[in-house]
Structure formats: structure tokens, C-alpha cells
Image: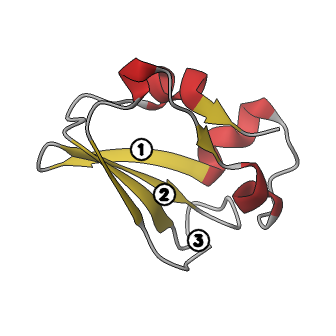
Amino acid sequence: VGAGTTDIYGYVLEQGATLNLKTLLAGTQWSGDPTTFGNFVKVTVANNNATVSVNPSGLGSGVSYPVVTLHGYAYLTMTTLMPHLVIN
């Protein structure tokens, strides 16, 4: 976590691509409980791009680190991203 951001261009999620966050999440305090997942992984949208960030502590006051920016995904939400994540 905190080692940089990957930029992804094109509509890869519509083509069935997945984002594997399993190893990244193993370096956080997330216990694997799906009800707390949103404390550790966030999606924010700005300038027509969606950024997926990870908060290693899961605390609201903790620092979040951007890990991937999906360019052109102005309407991506956690709900629409979840089917494309590998987390366990």
C-alpha cells in the first residue's frame, strides 16, 4: 500500500477484466468481513476518472492510498465495481 497508482485506460471492466486486490488487502487490517470492506476500499470519481483507494487501518481518520485509476469511468461506484474485484 502506498507504492504507487496503476493507470488503466479503456473500458476493461465491460470486457470482463478483474482487479485482484487480494495481496494488497492482506497487508491491511481487514479481517475478510464483507460488512467492513467499505472501510478499507473506496471509489472516488473526479474528472471523468474513478480511483480505487485502500485505507490500511480501515479507520475513518486513517490515510487512504490510491492504487488504481480507471480512466473514463465517470459513473463507477463500489456496487458496480464489486463484481470485478478479487478480494479473497
**What SS does tag 2 mark?**
strand
Q: Residue at x 22, y 46 (%)?
A: 49
Q: From this viewpoint, which residue is outermost toward the left? A: 47
Q: Nearer the viewer, residue 7 or 2?
A: 7
Residue 62 location, x and y as percent?
Answer: 58, 71
Residue picked out by circle 3: 62
* Image vertical order of residue 61 relative to residue 47, above or below: below
Q: Nearer the viewer, residue 24 or 58?
A: 24
Marks 2 and 3: CB-CB under 8 Å?
Answer: no
Marks 2 and 1: CB-CB under 8 Å?
Answer: yes
Q: Is residue 38 left or right of residue 46?
A: right
In front of the other: label 1 or label 3?
1
| Quadrant where the image shows the C terminus | top right
What's the amino acid at mark 2?
Ser
**What SS does tag 1 mark?**
strand
Residue picked out by circle 2: 53
Question: How many angstroms separate mark 2 from mark 1 (CA)?
Answer: 6 Å
